Amino acid sequence: MKLNSKGLTYISVCLGFSLPQIISAQIAKDSITKDIEMVKITRQISTFNNKKNLETNNSDLINHDAGKFLEALPEISGIKKAGSYATDPVLRGFKYEQLNIVIDGVASAINACPSRMDPATSQVPMNIVKEAEIYKGPYHFRQGSAFGGTINFVTIPPVFTDSLSTKARITSGYESNGNVLRDELSATLSSKKIVWDLFGSYQKGDDYKDGNGNKVPSSFLRYNLGTKASFKWNENNLTTFHLNTNQARDVKFAALAMDLLYDKTWMLQARHNMTFKNSIVKNLDFNSFASFVKHSMGTPDRSMISNVETKTFGGRAEAKLAWQNNIFYTGLDYKHEQAENISSQMPTMGGMMMQDGTSWQNSYINQIGWFNEFHHNFLNSKFTASYRLDYNQADAKDLSKLFQTLYGTANTDQLNNSLSLAYSQELNAKSKLSLLIGRAQRSGSLTERFINRFAGGLDAYELVGNPNLKAETNNQTDLIYTFKINKIFFQTDVFYSYLQNSISGKIIPLKPLNMKAPGTRQYQNLGNAYKTGFESRVNWNFLPKLNSEMAVAYTYAEEISTKNPLPEIAPLDFRWKLQYDISPIVLALKYRFVATQNRINPDFGELKTPDFSLVDFSAKMNVFKNAQVNFDVTNIFNRAYAEYLNRTLSTDKMQRILNPGRSFNVNFSYQF
C-alpha cells in the first residue's frame, strides 16, 4: 500500500476535523485516578495520584530550550552538542524517536538536521507552555506511539470573560555567564465568545565560561512569534487555531564540525472540541497540525553549507465514553514525516570522495494508528488496559546507488502492536501499590532507515540507514509504591525493560566518503538488551514555612549477548531542595550529586565521567501586585564538570563539553 501526497494531505485534514477524540486535558479532570505514572512540572508536579502546586519560575517563560527545562527531573538527562541550545532529552536511557514528544497531544516537528541540531524540543514555544506531562514507559498510547515514554507540552488554555477584557505579561531576564538576554511578551483579548492571544520571545547569548574559566563555543540567537485564537460557539463547542514561528540564527555547536546558520520553523494547529451531557459519549475532539522546518548549517568559514527541509503534518481524533465506573477512549491518528536536502556547497577536497545521493534521500514515513484505553474503577482499586495498532509505511524518492545495491528498494510496510495493562490497589488510607505491564513496538525512524553516509551519531563514523529494519520492541514493567500523610509524600518506582530487535549502528566493511571518518556504521537489529532502574521521591513539609524535596534516579542497561553497557546511559542522579517561604520572599537552596559513570560502551568510544556536586541558590520576591523578581546563583562553587551525555568537542574528541561555571541570573515578570 502506497499513499501519494494528495491522499496524505486529504487524510490529515479528515483526521484533524472529522474524527472523534478527547482533549488530553480532560484526563486530569476524570474522577478515576490514573494508573499510568505521570509527572507534571512547572506549575504542578503530579506524581501518580499526588499533585503539588509549585510557584511558577519566571525563567521557564523565557527559556528557549525545552530539553533543558525537562532536566528538572533526575530521570531525564539531555544530550548536548551545543553549550546553550537544543538539549535532546533522554528518559531512562530512551532517546530520539524512542520518545514521543508532542505539543497539546498531537503537534510536533521532526529534526531537519541529520545531526539533530533541531530536535523536537527545540521547537516548543516555552512562553505559552502551562506544563509538561511526562508519561514513563510503554503504557500511554493515546498521543502517539509510546516506546519509552511520552512527553506532552500543554499550552495555557483559554479563559473566557463575561465582558471584553485585556491582560498582558512581560518578562525580562539576564544571565551573567554568557551575557544572555531573555525577553518575552504575551497579550490576551477575551470575551464571552473569543479569546485571542499574541505572544513572542527573544533570547540571545554569547560564549559562556566553564568552571576552569575557559570559553565554550555556545553563542546563539533565538526568537519566536505566534498567535492563538479560541472561539466558543456555545457551552459544548470550542474551536482553537494556533500559529507560531520559531527562528534561530548563528548558533555555535561545540561538538559538531558545522554550526547552525539559520533554523526557520512554522507550526500551525487547528482543534475542535465537543462535550455532551446526558449521554454515554462525553467528549469528541478533532485536532490537526502541520510544521515546516528550513534548516541551514555550515562550517565556521562557510566553505561547506547544507540546506535541508522537513515537513510534518497529521491529525488526531478521539471519543470519550463514560458509564457507571468505566471510562473508554478510542480514536485514530495519522502522521506524515518527510526530510529532503535542498542544496549544498562542498569544496573540492582530496579527503572527500564523490557524493552518492543526498543524506536524507527525500525520504518519508506515513503512520496511521488506532488507539484504545479502558479504565474501570473498583471500590479501592483500579484497572486500566490500553491497545494501539499502527500501520507504518516508508520510502525514499531519491535513492542512492549504495542503497539500491544494498537493498534494491526502500519501500516498506509494517504493522506494530502495542498493549499495556495496569492495576492499582489502595493498601490503606495512606498507601497504594501499582503494577504496570506494557509491550510496545516502533518502526525505524527516518535516520535509522534512510540516512546516507552522514556522521551524525555518537562518534565520527559515517552512518548508513537500513530500510529493512525490523520493528524494535520494548517489554516493560513498573512497580510503584506511594505513601502519603499530611506532611510527607513518598514514592518509589522500580522498572525493568526487555528490548528485542534493538536498533543500533554496527561497523561494516564499507569505505567512508570522508577519509577523516574512522569507518562506516550501518543501522541493524542487534538482538536483545535490558534496562532496569528506579526513581524515588520524598517531599516533607517539616515546618510550616520550610519544605524539603529529595529525588533520585538510576538506570542500568546492558546488551545481553555481549554484556556491554548500552551507550549514553546517564549515571545515578540525586537532588535535594530546601525551600523557606517567608512571604513575600521565598528562598531555596538546591544540591545535586551525580555519580561516576564507569559503565561505558567501548564500541562507541565513550569516555568515563567523574562524579560531581553542585549547589545553587534562588530567591524570588513579589515586589508589588502582579510583579515578581527572581534571583539565582547557579554553580555557586564554580565547579568544572561535564554531564555524561555531553558530546565531545569537535576540536578534541577526548574532552566532553563542560557545563557553565558560576552564573548570576535575574529576571523580572509583570502581569497587567
Image (cartoon, rainbow, N blue to C red):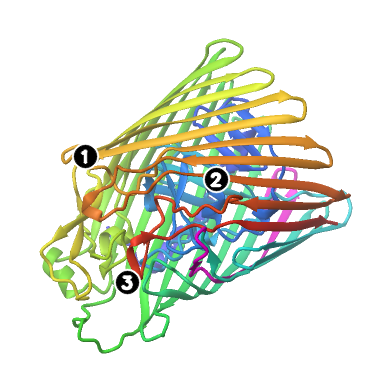
- Regarding residue 122, the answer to whether it shows in the image is yes
Query: How would you rate the neighbour count of disc 3 (Cα within 10 Å): few for under 14, some for 14-19, many for 20 or more?
Result: many
Residue 509 percent location from the top left of the image? 10, 64
- Quadrant in the picture for residue 417: top left
> In the rendered view, does 503 fall on the left or right side of 25?
left
Q: Which mark is residue 362?
A: 3
Gap in angstroms between the C-alphas marked 2 and 3: 45 Å
Q: Which callout, 2 or 3, points at the residue further toward the start of the chain?
A: 3
Query: How would you rate the neighbour count of disc 2 (Cα within 10 Å): few for under 14, some for 14-19, many for 20 or more?
Result: some
Mark in front: 1 vs 3: 1
The residue closer to the viewer here, 197 or 664, is 664
| 459 vs 357: above or below | above
As helix, strand or loop, the secondary structure at mark 3 comes to loop
Residue 495 percent location from the top left of the image? 38, 29
Q: On the rendered image, what quadrant is the C terminus found in?
A: bottom right
Q: Which callout, 2 or 1, points at the residue further toward the start of the chain?
A: 1
As helix, strand or loop, the secondary structure at mark 2 comes to strand
Q: Residue at x 65, y 33 (%)?
A: 29
Q: Which residues are magenta?
A: 211-239
Check if residue 662 falls in the magenta segment: no
